Amino acid sequence: MTTGAYISATAHAVLILFLLFGGLLEWNRPPEVSVADVSVVTEEEFAALTRPETSPEVATDAVAPAAPPVEEAPPVTAPVEEAAPEVPEPAPQPEAAEADAPAAPLPEPAPQPETEVTETAPPVEAPPVADDRPEAPEEVAPAPAPRVAPEPAAPAPPQAEEAPVVVEETVPSPEPAEVVEEEQVAAAPPEATTEIVTEAEKPKELAPASSPRPKTRPERKPEPVRTAETPKPETPKPAAEPKPAAETPRDAVADALAAALAGDTAPEAPRAAPSGPPLTGGEREGFRVAVQECWVVDVGSQAANVTVTVGVEMNPDGTVAGGQVRQISASGGDGSAQRTAFEAARRAILRCQKGGYALPVEKYDQWRDIEMTFNPEGMRLK
Amino acid sequence: MSAKRILTAIFLALASVLPAQAAPLRIEITEGVIEPLPVAVAPFIAETPDARQYAADIAKVVGQNLVGTGLFREIPQTAFISQITNFDAGVQYADWKAINAQALVTGAVSVASDGRIVVKFRLFDVFSEAPLGDGLQFVGDAATWRRMAHKVSDQVYSRITGEGGYFDSRVVYVAESGPKDARQKRIAIMDYDGANVQFLTDAASIVLAPRFSPQGDRVIYTSYETGFPAIYELNVNTVTRRRLDVPIDGMTFAPRFAPDGQTVVYSLAEGGNTDIYTLDLRTGASRRLTSSPSIETAPSYSPDGSRIVFESDRSGTQQLYVMGTDGSNPQRISFGPGRYGTPVWSPRGDLIAFTKQNEGRFHIGVMRTDGSEERLLTASFLDEGPTWAPNGRVLMFTRESAGAEGAPALYSVDISGRNLKRVPLNGPASDPAWSPLLP
């Protein structure tokens, strides 16, 4: 009896001791030393590696002088047209307001002076915060956001302002080096989600267990960067020198280059374009994305039931010839909805062309005529 | 969709291989963005010195109306590069493109010799460099300057969206005051945006569920004036009212006009059973449409006047049904979990809005008229009683907060579920009904 009790007590004590301290053998193992290869680099190489990516200096040259002080339009003398056009009688207003025909027909808009007001890029570079975000779990539901776009964008972190969509006149800075630090306000692209989230679909909990983040950094359509911000004090190159294309992975640079090149080559536009190879998938996709970023769809409207096909003729510099967009066909919806859908498509093409779409000029023959079908079927409310 | 893309890709590949150089490059765009359209509302020009205040006020209301839809974003005037100084001068499109304005509204206001004000406006599609429709002018009494601003806004809205506007409209509702257990209720009327509130009844008796006539000149509502609920018709312009000639031995409630304006559909509770009736206002004749032992109420006509949607618990739970205007062929259309009530047919005719109660929460939702494609737009402690904007694009409803301090308020939401916001009013308010667009 006592022997059994001793054996049992001893065995239990050993077991308890093992459970308590047995693991220490594991813990006491010395930590592995991580070994990394190192190599010696020269100061120049190091500088080259760590040089901050700068925006294309060429943009400065191309853009800065082009923003003239607000130009006075040639005085418009309203040409008295032959006869006032019959204006459709608007809704009668018995007691409150009466609608009449306009006092005068709208005079022809003044011929636009050749202003080079560049479309400055509203959404400036996202702050690094956006880059370092961990991958979001696959099934994270999109959070409600004011903008719904194919590519999600996280809300701006508190310290960053959302990029102002309205950009003031670009003023060439006499001392670029001085402006830089002040002007470079961290700004994020407008917050966007991939689908409409109604109040009914929001989770009940006000505090989510995990913060939903976009899976990857959104691919934004790169746009020319504000010139006042581009020059950096440590940038060794003179402002006017364009970077070789190989060094500029970002499309912003390519855009700016294309814009600059286009500016140079515009006068000799009617060139004999070779009937070269077709556009690559990437070139085609880049163009498609550029247009869709400006295609604003009102999903609650009747126009969201309309698929419209439009045709444009392009200039070699990637702009729409004469700003003319013609409707080829439309299906779904009534006449008014089709007109609205066409106007939205036209706005998308004309608004996003800016200095010209980034299409390879050597393949101009391939994209001189473009037909674009705007199909909102996938966006419609369901 | 992916199959379509593949087909498109194959087609494009084939097209590019073909020697015919005339073949255009074909691109299909299927994903756009949903975001407010940037609009510039230039300061309206005061063409006479005494019009300055009107010009400023009208331009402000136009901007507020457009932004309030959630479909537009107003570009601040401080960003403008060029100013509009002459209503008839040409527009420097490049200046407006530079600030990314997609539409530009210009206007001018003058005070005529008879004291009436004249409001002119033009709308421009900036990137197409062309006017969007003709310029228009409105003439009206100075006191109605807000309505003129709404009319301008309606024109701008409909020219850009291709749909009718809803700014020049009014809403009747029940204005509440006093503690929760002894609320006083009055019928009130306001502009769609909460301005110009006027009371149509006093607080002597409880009033419920005001509804506009299709012409917007009359309102019918339920009042407990005699101690029992009964239906009254009120002329909005003269503020005179009369009791409708319906059976007085039961409780009548939930009245609503038919699209012809001469028929009223309502519920009558008698001996524990509630059914739906119609009343011909010209002849005074009532007609019974349903006769089941369950509760049938909250009827609403389709805009073409051919069908009626209503709620019924004949299946055991409260659900939505659609029947002919003679009560024939009732079909259940709601099948989701929870209870459905207060259905309202959209003025467009394509959707039915409803209140849904499920898992302790209330929702405002919409579905197709056959019950398909149900979408819930809101969720809260208590949402109920949706009413449609005249263009069928926006819903207004009552939202009540929880607790002893809870009070009802009016909210509106776009049918996409976006742009949920409270209608700014001073006191508690419930049971809104939207008028048609004013003439």
Image (spheres, helix red, strand yellow):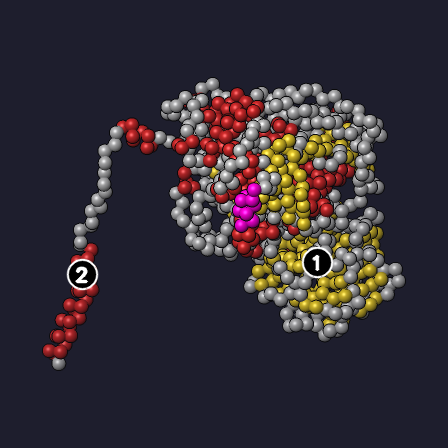
Chain assignment, label 1: B
- Left or right: A125 in relation to A12: right
Which of the 4 image quadrants contains residue B381?
bottom right
**Which marked residue is nearer to the observer: mark 1 or mark 2?**
1
Secondary structure beneath disc 2? helix
The amino acid type of the residue labelled 2 equals Phe
User: Looking at the picture, how far across and down is residue B348, in whole percent?
Assistant: 72, 53
Which of the 4 image quadrants contains residue A126?
top left
Q: Residue A21, which numbered label?
A: 2
User: Looking at the picture, how far across and down is residue A70, in whole percent?
Assistant: 60, 22
The Cα atoms of the two marked residues, 1 and 2, are separated by 73 Å
User: Looking at the picture, how far across and down is residue A80, in whole percent?
Assistant: 79, 24
User: Looking at the picture, how far across and down is residue B373, in whole percent?
Assistant: 62, 59
Q: Residue furthest top?
A: A174
Comparing B117 with A326, the one in front is: A326
Q: Residue at x 44, y 30 (%)?
A: A55
Chain assignment, label 2: A
Residue B45 seen in the current view: yes
Magenta-span inclusion, residue B285: no
Q: Residue B344, which numbered label?
A: 1
Magenta span: predominant SS is helix
- Left or right: B219 in relation to A339: right
Please tell me whether residue B179 is drawn above or below residue B122 in the rendered image. below
Q: Residue A380, which numbered label?
A: none
Please give the range of residues in magenta.
B10-19
Q: Residue at x 29, y 27 (%)?
A: A44
Pointer 1 local density, CA inside 10 Å: few below 14, some 14–19, many at least 20: many
Secondary structure beneath disc 1? strand
